[in-house]
Image: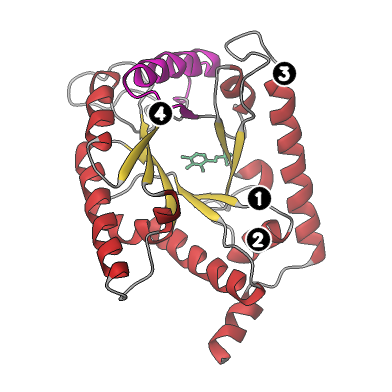
Amino acid sequence: MPEMNTEENHLQYTPERAEQLLQNYRRVLERIRAAEQDHSAVRTEVSAPVQLVTVTKFFPASDAAALLDGGVTLFGENRDQEASAKARELAAYCAQREVQPPHWAFIGQLQTNKAKSVVKYASSVHSVDRPSLADALAKAYANQLSRFEAGEAPAPAAAEHGALTCLVQVSLAEVATAGHAAEGARGGTSASELLELVERIENHEHLRCGGVMAVAPLGMNPDEAFEKLYGLASLVREQVPHATEISAGMSGDLEAAVRWGSTCVRVGSDIMGKRPAL
Ligand SMILES: *Cc1c(COP(=O)(O)O)cnc(C)c1O
C-alpha cells in the first residue's frame, strides 16, 4: 500500500537522534531512581516506583518512534490535533512491525468538543478540571464503545483497561481575587471543588478516577506546591481508595515532586530537547 510507505518514510530517524533521545531518557530515569531514595518527605522504603511519561509535544512522530524502538511505551501530549495525528502515525508504524502501540496520556487543557477525538487514542487524561469535561469524556467513550460493538469503529484506547483513567487537575495557586486568575496559576480545579469532581468522575460507568495532577505554579517553591498536592491527594484517597496516582513533576522540578509522593512525572524538554519558541 503506497500510503503505508509514506508513513514508514515519514517515521525514519537517524541513529544519532535515537541515541541522543535514549541517552536523555536514561538520564531522566536515573534522576527519578535517585529521587526515589530521598525519604526526607513522604516516600518510604515501600513506596512504589515512579512512572515516567515522555512528553513529545512539538516534536515529530519519528522521535516518538525512536524512543518506542528503544523500549519507551508511555507518551504524553497536550494538544488534541497534534496528539491524534502522532498517535495515528505511531499506530501505523507499530502495525507494520507487529508490535504493541504505545500508551498516550493526554495532559493539556481540553475543550469538551475534543473529547470524541481524545478517547480514540488516550488511555488516560491527566487534566480533567471541570464536570462538563468529565461528562463529555464519558459520553464520547460510550459512543465510541457502541460504534465498536456495532463493528463500525475501533474500540476506545482505554477499553483494554475497562475504563478511561481520569486524573483531576488541581490548581495549587493561592486563591484568586474575584474575577482574576491567581498569579502564576497553571489551570486546574480549586481545592474546594476537588472532591465533587472526583465523585462526578466515579459516577460515570466508563470513567475511573485515578488520582490528581498538578503543575507547580510559577514563582511558588516546588516543595511547598507538591506538599500541598500531597495533602489534597490524601483527601481524594480517603474518598476513593483506588485513586492513588499523583501526576506531578516536570523537567525542572521532578525531584521535589517525587519527594512529595509523585507516582508519575511528565518530562518533555529534558528528554526531547529545547522546545522551538512559539
Ligand atoms: C509540556 C508539559 C510538561 C513537560 O514539561 P517540561 O518542562 O518540558 O518537562 C509536563 N506537563 C504538562 C502539563 C505539560 O504541558
Q: Which residue is mark 2?
A: 63
Q: Is residue 85 left or right of residue 178?
A: right
Q: Residue at x 54, y 68 (%)?
A: 91
Marks 3 and 2: which is nearer the front?
3
Circle 1 SS class? helix
- Numbered range of the magenta stretch: 217-246
| Marker disc for residue 272 | 1
Q: CA distance from mark 1 to mark 3?
A: 25 Å
Is residue 68 highlighted in magenta? no
| Marked residue nearer the N-terminal end (1 or 3) | 3
Could you classify mark 2 by the number of other residues whose Cα lies within 10 Å: few (under 14), some (14-19), or many (20 or more)?
some
| Marked residue nearer the N-terminal end (1 or 4) | 4
Marks 4 and 2: which is nearer the front?
4
Q: Which residue is mark 3?
A: 37
- Tell whether circle 2 marks a residue whose Cβ is less than 8 angstroms from ligand 1: no
Q: Residue at x 43, y 19 (%)?
A: 229
| Amino acid found under the numbered disc labelled 1 | Met
Residue 215 position within the rendered picture, expressed as x and y whole percent measured from the top left: 46, 30
Discs 3, 2 touching: Cβ within 8 Å: no
Residue 136 position within the rendered picture, expressed as x and y whole percent measured from the top left: 22, 50
Residue 85 position within the rendered picture, expressed as x and y whole percent measured from the top left: 46, 67
Marks 1 and 4: which is nearer the front?
4
